[in-house]
Amino acid sequence: MTIVMGIETSCDETGVGFVQDGVLLGDALASSMDEHARFGGVVPEIAARAHVASMIPTVHKAISNAGISLADVGAIAVTAGPGLATALHVGVAAAKAYALALEVPLYAVHHLAGHAAADTLEHGPLPDRSVVLIVSGGHTSLLFVRDLVRTPIVHLSDTLDDAAGEAFDKVSRVLDLPYPGGPSIDAAARSGDRTAVAFPRPLTGPGDPELGFSFSGLKTAVARYVERGIPAGIGVPDVAASFQEAVADVLITKALRACRRQQVQTLVIVGGVAANSRIRELAQERCDQAGIGLRIPPIRLCTDNGAMIAAIGDLLVRDGAKPSPADFSATPTVALSSAQLY
Ligand code: KG4
Ligand code: ZN
């Protein structure tokens, strides 16, 4: 069975992982997160330079964690998009170099397909039909998925404006919580009262698109609330918990609606925001009530990593997919319709 190396550099994490026949052999991650903190968001040029510096050490660390040698690698998968152009280029260049040097096939894959594939490392192959909720820093989508690498992926809805993770990041700035925003809201909310502030549940009124998402208005609602001055008796943790509850409520309500509409029995939640403790808890509660099976990858496989790219590469290799042509390039913006980009 082929050992697939996955390389991920779409944002600020340099990720490398090795997967063989659906099993994660080992992986490693380097992050430039700390270098972006003082800017309050990822600076593409800084991220790209950090990828250049981290790439080879991260490959070596992952090799050592997996207990293999480079010569054991039989195929390579790399995130070709979507993501930051400068950052993607580094991963694509490295993957091409390794593929040439090792004389192994190379697969250009879609970052979001990787997020979905991450779950298979923990829970095995996806069922025949599932609804996948992708919630990351750049995307919020409900997908109808059959075979992740064989069947075109159907978008049931995509956010009209901000992605869920973007809303977490922006609201954390409004609340003066440390960067990165998602984890710090999650942490602050643990000691807060999620019923303290009744923030709006966007697009849940009669006449609104049943599966539609919009988070920009919710973000503004929190900003206005804070600008007016947080009332006595209410603290930042309460505001964080109330905001987080609104996001969790809307995401899960719509995801379960999609499951009913598509008549599927399995909901899969993936992407960085799927690391959120309240989203995980509320999703489990509501899925149990609805009799829907819930799959969420372990937290370390929710945020960007190399294992998820190796996982989607492994699925492609086992399906007999044709390698990507040597002349493909990074593609910063591309909707998810198939796992392989070229
Ligand atoms: O998937 P990801 O690592 O990168 C993208 O593909 O965008 O997702 C990053 C996003 C960020 O917006 C980050 O704030 C959010 O995921 N995030 C979280 C948590 N951990 C990461 N959001 C809420 N709660 C968390 N625990
Ligand atoms: Zn991601």
Image: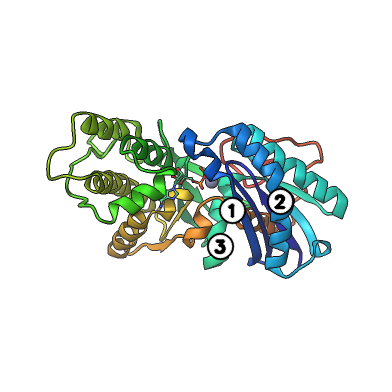
Do callouts 3 and 2 mark residues in contact (Cβ within 8 Å)?
no
Alpha carbon distance from label 2 to label 1: 13 Å
Q: What element carries label 3?
A: helix
Question: Residue 271: where, in percent of width, then height?
Answer: 49, 50
Q: Is residue 331 visible?
A: no
Q: In this view, does 165 lie to the left or right of 198?
A: right
Question: Residue 258: where, in percent of width, then height?
Answer: 38, 48
State the mark number for residue 77: 2
Which label lies toward us, 2 or 1? Answer: 1
Which residue is rendered at x = 45% and y = 35% of the image?
A: 40
Q: In this view, does 138 lie to the left or right of 201?
A: right
Q: Is residue 8 left or right of residue 161?
A: right
- The residue where tag 3 is placed is 120
Which residue is rendered at x = 82% and y = 46% of the image?
A: 97
Disc nearer the start of the sequence (2/1): 2
Which amino acid is tagged 1? Answer: Asn
- Residue sitting nearer the eye, 292 or 64: 64
Q: Is mark 1 on a helix, strand or loop?
A: loop
Alpha carbon distance from label 3 to label 2: 16 Å
Which residue is rendered at x = 59% and y = 38% of the image?
A: 82
Which label lies toward us, 3 or 2? Answer: 2
- Picture quadrant of residue 337: top right
Q: In which quarter of the image is the C terminus?
A: top right
Question: Residue 11: where, in percent of width, then height?
Answer: 58, 41
- Disc 2 crowd rating (10 Å Cα; few below 14, some 14-19, many 20+) is many
Disc nearer the start of the sequence (3/1): 3
Which label lies toward us, 3 or 1? Answer: 1
Q: Is residue 70 visible?
A: yes
Which residue is rendered at x = 65% and y = 65% of the image?
A: 26
Which amino acid is tagged 3? Answer: Thr
